[in-house]
Amino acid sequence: MGRGFRLIFATSLLLMLLDLCRGSTIGICYGRNADDLPTPDKVAQLVQLHNIKYLRIYDSNIQVLKAFANTGVELIIGIPNLDLLPFSQFQSNADTWLKNSILPYYPTTKITYITVGAEATETSSNVTALVVPAMQNIFTALRKVGLHKRIKVSTTHSLGVLSRSFPPSAGAFSSNYASFLKPLLIFLAENQSPFMIDIYPYYAYRDSPNNVSLDYALFEPSSEVIDPNTGLLYTNMFDAQVDALYFALMALNFRTIKIMVTETGWPSKGSAKETAATPDNAQTYNTNLIRHVINDTGTPAKPGEALDVYIFSLFNENRKPGLESERNWGLFYPDETSVYNLDFTGRGSVNVITGANITSSNGTTWCIASSNASDMDLQNAINWACGPGNVDCSAIQPSQPCYEPDTLVSHASFAFNSYYQQNGATDVACSFGGAGLKVDKNPSYDKCIYVTAGSNKTATSNATAISSHSSSQAGKQAKNTRGTKYLMATRSFRTTCRSRMRKLRCRR
């Protein structure tokens, strides 16, 4: 008994210390307000391929929770505003929801936060009155099963919760929400939960381009603003808005509540009047944001302070109402291809003028699998490349030119390079969650030809070498001698055409 208690205590202490030592993190919001998105299983593969470790969803959809089981991806799940009433009325409703919708999937699916309502102050006052009672009931339900310290409870806000945000030192909460905010802030402080805020410099620039510099909104260093009260220098609007919230909390003497940015981003396309909604600006904002956050830069008022940030959004969502930009915040199209190149590690070299990552200008490069990558990472990457990635993987099926040597590294190298070349030979296209490696030496061997960007001859060479009997097998999944199943079916024997950005692109 005593030994077991000591083990539990030691484990809990270790987890707490690891959490304290963990720096700032970047997550992605997975909105699903669309009718053309891939299945949650395919989304889970895409997320793992790009080494995304943190994800926010807006409900507790069972299929999504199942899809992210055993992935290691940490989820923020949500209770929508429309569902708040029963949770606020009766403790039993919260208990039942936790028992039926969360506990069957936890901890196989890692859930770290529950957002109770979203931007309630942007809706009717009736909704704000439901938020804190619902939060308290969810927290009590978690405490009953001993998870109240593992899964934190909070709610999200728009920047409209502030009555003033400039200069940052004058940040103040709106008195209109005093009755809502006071019990909320007490709850957050008592339970060490973060104040969750959605921050969008894009809207500030779009609505007031004469008063807000585009460079300032995009994290570009050519623009600076000085807070006249503190003398603090701000080089971007994001920091200024976060600090305005810090100062608003301090003004009410809530100095221990941490801030989490649960949405931010930039649209890649907009209506005629939304001239700043472009792929280049979206790439610039999110690239600079990621670098700023993962370097643990903090803000001028809180230098070095860890800050978790979630980028909106994973996909373009075609059912969102409003201006054209509302449907174009995604990092990926519904077909899982990138809207623009983005290095989620923040370490890559990005050319924000051309919108592409720069490869060697001295010659051709290829992408192969790293010998240090784990078998699981390679297998997941092969499955994605040969499936949703639209790579023609027939050449690595049995009896075909690139099947030997029959190893994961060899097969992954062929699949990686094919995806890399057909997606512009960019750095991001060779990432594969860290499993890809760029080389300047041609890895082709014997009759196994590794394609290069824009080359049709090399792709045809492998196809020509495929024996005629394999055509009858093209619709089946192949299995190598080690029992590893690849998603390789009919890629080289059918033509896939898709329309994007007014250009018809066909891939064979």
Image (spheres, rainbow, N blue to C red):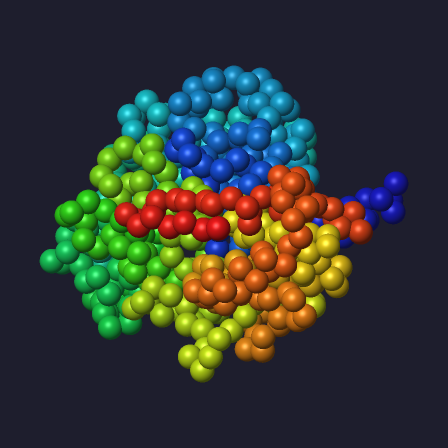
Tell how many labels.
0
Q: Out of 72 and 381, give the one closest to the viewer.
A: 381
For residue 90, side relative to residue 261 (left or right): right
Q: Residue at x 66, y 71 (%)?
A: 445
Residue name at image x 24 percent, y 35 percent: 322
Residue 397 lies, in percent from the top left, at: 69, 52
Point 35% across, 25% down: residue: 127
Outermost front residue? 468
The reply to whether residue 488 is in sight is yes
**Residue 485 or residue 25, whichever sits in front:** 485
Where residue 138 sits, quadrant-wise, is top right
**434 versus 194 height, above or below:** below
For residue 347, above or below residue 419: below
Specify the quadrant of the image occupied by residue 82. top left
| Residue 101 in the image, given as x and y percentages of width and height | 60, 26
Which quadrant: the N terminus? top right
What residue lies at 43% left-to-right and 19% top-to-bottom? 85
Question: Splitting the image into 4 quarters, where does residue 326 fall?
Answer: top left
Q: Is residue 168 left or right of residue 287?
A: left
